[in-house]
Image (tube, rainbow, N blue to C red):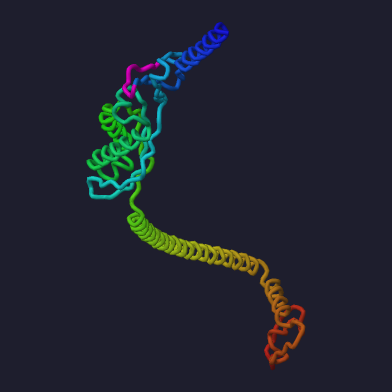
Amino acid sequence: MRTGVTGVAALVLLLVLLLAAYSGLYTVSPTQQTIVVRFGEPIRVVTDPGLNYKIPFIDGVIPIEKRILDLENPAQEVLASDRRRLIVDAFARYKITNALKFFQTVGTVPNANIQLSQQLNAALRSVLGEVTLIEIVRDRRAELMVRSREQLDQKAQSYGISVVDVRIRRADLPEQNSQAVYQRMQTERQREAAELRAEGAQRAQEIRAKADRDATVIVAEANRQNEQTRGDGDAERNRIFAEAYGQDPDFFAFYRTMNAYEAGLRSGDTRFLLRPDSSFFRYFSDPSGKWKPAGAQ
């Protein structure tokens, strides 16, 4: 009987020892580092991943991130050196490099984010307050982000944190200022458009006036050449007629009279008030065209 009780007690003791030994084992993930604490006091930091051992029921394990963490900072108002107000939206990335210091100063990631957010706001105000709006928005933005990261990193070292990067996501004027700037820009663009339209209208009028002037000159020159050509043609015609008349005056007189008959005696209501013995009808009375005045023998 006593042997059986002893066996059961030994088995129970063995199970307790196995449970205690199992509870002393813990695993460190590759993405984490751990702090072993005893009665709330840190005794060592384990950074290498793998299986480790602690004193059961006495030591505790606090995991600390080894990966890069994000800090999302709420948008804040910053006053530039030219007294222009800006709404700056920035964020940071950081890494816990000294787990023991991190645990002793801020303890947890949420507490670290609160402290870093305040320090980031102070760094942004300090750096951006030394430059103008144009330098922040366009000319020196990359340089200003580097300076902000350096200032924040100096403050974060006291927490066992290294700041990897600081970025200004957006830097805009406040809404009321943006509307005023937009209205001013719109007015300026409308003024420029009106000037361009006026210049275009003036240029178009000049082009039309020049085109009208050129057209007038071209038409006048064409008319001059036309009249000259017509005059030359008429002169040539008269010369030919004169030569023809000189060669055979009777035929020329007959030809001209026939043309006059054709033009004057067209079908229709044609009336002449002429004497029958008029020279116009001389070929009716004499085929040779000899005209004799009335009363001549």
Q: Quadrant of the C terminus?
A: bottom right
Q: Position of residue 291 (x, y in %)?
A: 70, 84
Is 210 situated above or below 16? below
Circle count = 0
- At x 29%, y 29%, the residue is 105
Q: Quadrant of the N terminus?
A: top right
As drawn, the residue found furthest toward the front would be 1
> What are the residue bounds of the magenta stretch?
39-47
Q: Position of residue 146 (x, y in %)?
A: 30, 32
- At x 38%, y 58%, the residue is 186
Q: Viewer-proximal residue, 204 or 166?
A: 166
Is 250 situated above or below 76? below
Q: In the image, is residue 139 part of the stretch drawn in magenta?
A: no
- Examine the image and state in which quarter residue 35 appears: top left
- At x 40%, y 59%, the residue is 193
Q: Viewer-proximal residue, 206 or 199?
A: 199
As drawn, the residue found furthest toward the bottom would be 295
